[in-house]
Structure formats: C-alpha cells, structure tokens
Image (cartoon, rainbow, N blue to C red):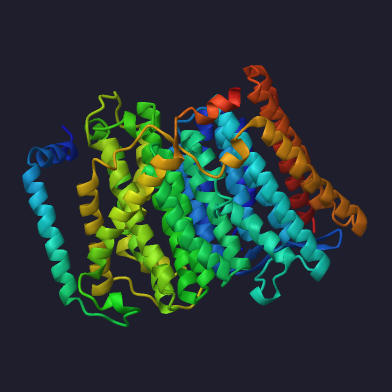
Amino acid sequence: MGLVHPVLLFLLGAVLAAVLPVKARRYALVAVPLLAFLSVHGMTEGTYGEATWLGFRLVFAEVDALAIVFLHVFTLMALIGAVYGLHVEDRWQHVSGFLYVAGALGVTLAGDYLTLFVFWELMAFASAFLVFLRRQPESLRAGFRYLLVHTVGGLILLGGIFLRYLETSDLSFGPIPEAQAGLAAYLILIGFALNAAVPPIHAWLPDAYPESTVMGGVFMCAFTTKTAVYVLLRAFPGYEVLAIAGAIMTLYGVGYAIIENDARRILAYHIVSQVGYMVCGIGIGTALAMNGAVAHAYAHILYKALLFMGVGAVLEMAGTTKLTELGGLYKRMPLAMLATVIGGISISGFPFTSGFISKSMIVAGAGEAHRIVLLLMLLLASVGTFLSVGIKLPYFIWFGKDSGVPCQDPPKNMLVAMGIAAFFCFFLGVYPDYLYRLLPFDAEYHPYTAYHFAETCQILGFTGLGFYLLRKKLAPEAKFNLDVDWLYRKGSEQFLRLARGAVSPANDWVSELYRTVGMRVALGLAALSARFDVKAVDGVVDGLAYTVRGAGDGLRRTQTGRLQQYIAMAVAALFAVLALVASH
Amino acid sequence: MNPIVRWIDRGRAEPQLLRAGFFTLLGLIVLFDVFAPRHEPHFFGDNLRGFWAVFGFLGCIALAKFMKGIGHAWLMKPVDFYAKKDEG
C-alpha cells in the first residue's frame, strides 16, 4: 500500500473544495490528485484495510497489478480533470468531481462486494451532480433519468450480491467461473454491464453526458464506464456473452455517432463504442485480449478526456456543440482544434498515437483466438470511428463553411490540461513499453510490425477516401436520434406507471428478502445502501413528476436539495465505516 | 497570426495540391502493403494484398449509407421530440 488510502485523499479533497476560499482551493484541487498519483507509484501488492463488521469481512484495499494500472490512470485523469476545471468557480462541481473519483478508486480497491457496492453508489450519486450542476432544465431532467437508471442498476447488483451471499456465504470480490455462474452471477453481471453502457442498457450515457457541465463531462467520460470495465475484468473474464455484446457495442456506438449532430453526444456514443472493444477483449478472455482491454482503458481515458476537453472548450467559448451551428472555428480556436484533432487521431488508432498500440492488442487477441467475425466487427468499428470522430467531428467544427460564431481559445488552465492529455496520447504511442510494463497478464505483443502498419494505414486512408466522396451526404442534420431511452421517456404517465409497476415491487422484493432470510442486522450496511435506493427512486419519481408538470425553479431546487441530503448521508455512512476500519 | 492557422490557410488555398497529395499517399500505402511481410495470418484476408484498403473503403460507404438510411427512415426526429411530450 502507499502512504495513504487514495479514497481518503479524495474525500479530504472534497471537504477542502467545499470549505476553502477560491485561491487556496486551487492549490488543493491540484495537490490532492497529484499526491494520489504519486502514492499509487509507491503502492505494493497485498491486502490492506481488512475489517470484520457484523460478521462480514470487509477489504478496503486489495492491491494487485490489475488494480494498480487502473489506479494509475484514474489518478492521472483526476489530475487532468482538476487542472481543466481550475477556473470553475462553482465549488460544488469540484466537490462532486472529487467524490466521484473517490467512488471510482474505492471500487477499484474494494476486495469485497459490500465495500464495492457502497463506493459504486457513491459514484452514481456524485456524478449525477455533475449533470445537475449545469443548472439547465434539460440537464435536471437528464440528471434525474441518469440517477434513476443507475439506482435500478444498483438494485440489480445488490440483488445479485445478496443471492450470492445466500448461495456461497462469501462476499469476496473475485472471478466467478462461467461454468458455476447462476442467477446471482448474472444479476451482478447486469449491474456491472449497465455501468459499462452495454446496449440495450446504455442509453443513460448518451442521454446524460451531453447535458453535464463542461468540467463534469471530462470527469464522467473517464470513470463510470472504466470502473465497470475493471470489475468485469475481475469477475467475469472469458464470458462468451461479453465477447459478443462487446463487438456489437463497438458498431452500435459508431453507428449513432455517424448520424449524430451534437459533438458531445457523438463523443458519448464513442464511449459506448470504445468500451465495446474492452468488453469484447474481456469476453475473449485470453491474456493478450485482456491485456488489450486494460491497455485500451488506459489509452481511452486519456484521448477521450482530450476530446471532451476540446469540445467542452467549444461549448464554453462558442456556446453550442451542434455541428450544424458550427464550422470554420480553426481561425479563432487553433489550440483547441489541435487538441481535438490529436484526440481524434488517437481514438482512430493512427500510428504513433496511443490508440494504435492499445486497440490493436484486442484485435490481435481476437485474431489469435481465431474469432474472425469478432475481428472483422472490431475493424469495421474502427472504420466508423475514424469516419465520425476522426474526420466528421473536426471537419464540421473547425473547417467546412465558416459559421461566423464569435469565440477564442479557452483559458490557460484548460489548455494546460489538454496539453498533458495530448502529450500522453503521443507518449504512449511512441513509447508503448511505459504502458505495457504495467499490464497485469502475461502476454507479449509488438504493435510496430510492417503488416500492422500497412493494415492500419489502408483502413484509415481509404475511410478518408470514402468520406471525401460522401462528404455532402454525411453533412450533419439538426435532428434528434431515437435510442432505447425512448422506452422510459415516451411519456411521463407511462413512465410513472412503469416506475410504480416495476421498480417498487423490485424494492419490496429486496426488502422482503432481508426479512425472510432473517439477516436484517447482519446485512445492516447493505440495507442502509438499499434505503438510499428506495428513497432515491421515490425522490426521483417525485422529482420527475414535478419537473414534468413544469414546476418552478424553487421546487426543482428543493428537489436537488433533498438529493444533496442523500449524498451527504451516503458519504457520512462511508466515513463511519472507514473510521471503524481505521480503529481496528 | 498563429502559425497553425497560417499553415491551414495555405493548404486550403490550394485544394488541387491537397487532393493530389492525398491520392499519392493512398497509392503509396497500397504499394507498401504489397511488400509488407505477413507473420501468422489469421484468415484469408491477411494474405490478400490491398484487402484492408477495400475493406476500409467499402466499410465506410456501407456504414454511412446504412446509418443515414435508417436515420431518415426511423431514428431522426425533430429536436424537440421529447420536450413536447415532457411538457404536455
């Protein structure tokens, strides 16, 4: 273990962000993630922070190679995000951002399902505030939908955890062999897959992320889906269903990205697509494919953050991210342009960028496992990736017809953050051993072979030719694209009926489960978390009803106020448990 | 003026030159593939020279046509599609 549990650092950081005056706060915002990043470098493998609580063995820090590589990139990303948001005066965004990171790190280090669940919920609550704090009516609605979906996902996960405990009397968090997987394992898998945005339970992501604050989007694109990748890697390696679902995800995401008009929604769909590569790699389950999933998570966090930062700068400076309203901005925001172009070529896997050395590991993993259909799906998705985010997005924001939107390059801190991320995109591409050394599984891979180079250049070059020929047809359209969130958005009445009809019984069922198995006390901690769920579901349903009826801002504020109480309660509970452990 | 902007302006002033450069590059890429050695090919496409060029080009056209088609036929709605219903 390092000097101090990184979760404690970020919880302290959240408190500091809440109380310090602006100038001192800025120092804290940089110091906390920097310290955490350094402390990850000093970590040694082992099990720390063990405690027995009400008969459960809780493990707050299970450190191994897999955890370290994720902690590495999570803390680096927290540093980049904090620098990017330094100019943001709204302290609650910083508080939510740090609590969100604390949740992600807590999940990464959790050695048992109960600890994992507590931090899992903290992540969902804290990140919802990064949407609410945009303070637009649409972001409030999207934030409530986001919270509701994650609450349901959390309940499914909790149901799986309970069932697993009933079956095995063991809550330690480790691989579940596919042959032994029953209902409990698949409920846990669904809970995880929801956070990984696996279709058809992905729509929360392109719904909520584009409505988040500028800084919030940069944080959100990194943590929720990648912690999900991490827990899937740990619990469900080699599950065939993940290999297939992952390959479908890659194409589903790019498909929507090709027809989408909002730049941040394009990037959100690309998260679905890119996480698909990782999920597919986990499903293939060989050492090479799983290493690829880890490497791709690392590289993806950095280039996707770079893209979200560049497009966030456009939103901040030009006031919109609709491609139909943009164009010709390169003259006024050349540095932000450079950032998105670097992000775009990295996600497309250009030689000498991070995408080239990470995505190809998963593709090679599919090839070596003789999964040719998967391999072709993944490569077709990389055609779509370059088409939509490598060419279309930069073309219609920065080049194309000049829209005349007045703007300029963003504040210095945002440029510095983009610079750090851009540096890593090239650094990993040119010096892949830095990343490969961190990879947990035993597999050798060399990205720079003549054939891989030829294959990549052909795919990218001729995709470019396709765009050139179809550029008129591919022009963005000011439309909104339907996705499966239609199912819960198609009308408030049906939605409320659905919520009363399906969600409440699910809650009751879980409560009933506590009682009938007679473990109310033993499951105290989990029950407490479930209480948040029950309350949150009610709160969200009420809240949605109020907003839908067009209630004034006052009502909305009380609603968010109540949610602030929930999150405060969640954090308080967390502190209590940490304190209990520390006293042992 | 920012040097990045100057370079882009210079490129945009001569579209023919850019196009010629792009097509030359595509030619060189395929030429490179003809001579690139193959280690452990995974399937027949790995041994065909220029396979990935055709794959990239046709894949791009197919994805674009398919998604635009399904978008126009079904997925694309007016931007206030949900707003109308939410407030109703």
Number of marks present in the image shown: 0
Residue A446 sits above or below residue A530 on the image: below
> Which of A534 and A81 lies nearest the eye of the viewer?
A534
Left or right: A460 as drawn, with respect to A529: left
Residue A465 spot, x, y in % from top left: 20, 53
Q: Is residue A552 visible?
A: yes
Residue depicted at x 38% and y 33%? A321
The reply, left or right, for residue A343 in relation to residue A61 is left
Q: Please indicate whether residue A25 sits to the left or right of residue B44 in the image.
A: right
**Residue B46 found in image quarter:** bottom left
Q: Nearer the viewer, residue A511 or A503?
A: A503
Please determine whether, in this image, residue A464 is positioned above or below residue A555. Answer: below
User: Which residue is situated farthest in the front direction here?
Assistant: B73
Where residue A539 sits, quadrant-wise, is top right
- Identify whether A176 is placed above or below A498: below
Image quarter where the C terminus of chain A lies is bottom right
Determine the residue positioned at 36% across, 63% down. Answer: A379
Nearer to me, A149 or B9 = A149
- The quarter in which the N terminus of chain A is drawn is bottom right
Name the image quarter holding residue A336: top left
Point out residue A463 in the picture as x, y percentages from the top left corner: 26, 56
- Camera sees residue A358: no
Residue A188 percent location from the top left of the image: 68, 60
- The residue depicted at 64 percent of the width and 16 percent of the height is A552
- On the image, the x and y values in percent for residue A478 come to 38, 32
| Relative to A169, residue A115 above or below | above
